Each structure stands twice: as structure tokens, then as C-alpha cells.
């Protein structure tokens, strides 16, 4: 039984890493309505990190919030929670430690992922570049992934600002 569990865990990790570390991927063509969430527009923001999560997610999965509380330069983090949880915003912040703006998913139902928490990487014009399911192992790869993404996709993000 342990051997089967070990094999299944390995398969899941390989699958997730193949989703996470794909190079030369064409961006998803649906645009995210980033303008609905922005309170202030900044030319310094190159990438928006949108985290769909719920207070009911497993604690290890919510550890990604610790990383996102201090985003790399040029990135902004916005949290999205289910509509029914927004009245408990103080409790959400207290339990998760989230220090970034948090909004309701009311107007974003079309973009709500099946699995939460999920982190979207969205350009300034709303282009969705990646979606990462947060499964509790983000500490080991997320900072490196974001750094590598910014290096490899900088030409895409510069083009967006010119439009």
C-alpha cells in the first residue's frame, strides 16, 4: 500500500511540474477583467498575481499566502474569496495572515477555478499567462518559478504596456 501511495504521489508531482514548468506556452486567450479589481493603476506593475482561495482550504495549501505577502518587484497580489466569506474578512486575514487586498468572487464567477487555492499570473492588459494549483509545496518552487517567468516572458509584458 505504501509503495502504491509513493508511486501515485510521484505521478501527481510529475504531472504538476509538467504544468508548472512548460516553456514557450501560448498564453490563454481569455482576458481577465483586471480593471474591475484595480484601485490604482501603476506602470510599475508588470504581473498581477490573483489568488482564488477559501478560508476552508487546507492549511498547507494556504501557506502560499506567506510567500505572496512579499511579492517580487513588479508584481501585485490580489486575493479572491467566495462571496459568502467576504463578510468574515477580518477573520480571513487573522487566520491566513493575508496582507494583500481581498475581493469577492461575485463578478468573477467565470474565472473561478475548480480547485482552490489557485494562483493566476495575469499581465497588465488582462492576459492570463498561467494558473497554478496550490497544493502545499509552493515554498520549494514558487519564487524560482516567478523569477524565471519574469525573465522569459518580459518581452510579452513589455508589449502589453505599449498597446
Image (cartoon, rainbow, N blue to C red):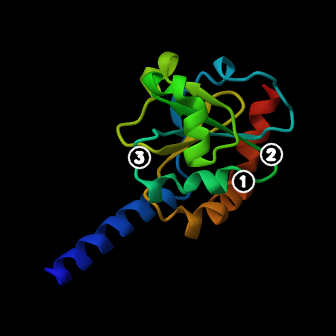
Count neighbours of disc 1 (C-alpha within 10 A) and say few if under 14, some if 14 to 19, many if 20 or more: some
> Is residue 54 toward the left or the right of residue 42 in the image?
left
Q: Residue at x 54, y 57 (%)?
A: 63
Residue that badge 1 annotates: 150
* Chain-order first, disc 3 or disc 2: 3
Q: Nearer the viewer, residue 81 or 118?
A: 81
The secondary element bearing badge 3 is classed as loop
Residue that badge 2 annotates: 74
Above or below, 116 against 80 in this view is below
User: Closer to the observer: label 3 or label 1?
Assistant: 3
Classify residue 27 by image quadrant: top right
Count neighbours of disc 2 (C-alpha within 10 A) and say few if under 14, some if 14 to 19, many if 20 or more: few
Residue that badge 3 annotates: 57
Percent x, y for residue 34?
A: 65, 25
Q: Nearer the viewer, residue 65 or 18?
A: 65
Above or below, 1 against 133 in this view is below
Classify residue 99 by image quadrant: top right
Q: Residue at x 80, y 45 (%)?
A: 74
Distance (Cα) linking label 3 and label 1 = 28 Å
Circles 1, 2 touching at the beta carbon (< 8 Å): yes
* Chain-order first, disc 3 or disc 1: 3
The secondary element bearing badge 2 is classed as loop
Q: Residue at x 50, y 52 (%)?
A: 62
Amino acid at each position: 500500500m505504501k509503495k502504491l501511495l509513493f508511486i501515485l504521489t510521484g505521478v501527481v508531482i510529475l504531472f504538476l511540474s509538467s504544468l508548472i514548468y512548460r516553456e514557450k506556452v501560448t498564453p490563454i486567450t481569455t482576458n481577465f477583467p483586471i480593471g474591475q479589481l484595480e484601485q490604482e493603476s501603476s506602470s510599475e506593475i508588470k504581473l498581477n498575481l490573483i489568488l482564488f482561495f477559501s478560508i476552508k482550504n487546507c492549511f498547507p495549501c494556504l501557506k502560499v499566502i506567506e510567500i505572496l505577502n512579499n511579492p517580487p518587484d513588479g508584481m501585485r497580489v490580489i486575493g479572491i474569496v467566495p462571496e459568502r466569506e467576504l463578510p468574515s474578512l477580518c477573520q480571513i486575514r487573522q487566520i491566513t495572515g493575508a496582507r494583500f487586498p481581498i475581493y469577492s468572487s461575485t463578478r468573477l464567477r467565470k474565472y473561478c477555478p475548480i480547485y482552490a487555492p489557485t494562483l493566476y499570473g495575469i499581465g497588465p492588459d488582462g492576459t492570463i499567462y498561467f494558473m497554478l494549483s496550490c497544493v502545499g509545496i509552493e515554498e520549494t518552487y514558487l519564487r524560482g518559478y516567478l523569477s524565471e517567468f519574469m525573465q522569459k516572458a518580459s518581452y510579452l509584458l513589455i508589449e502589453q504596456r505599449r498597446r
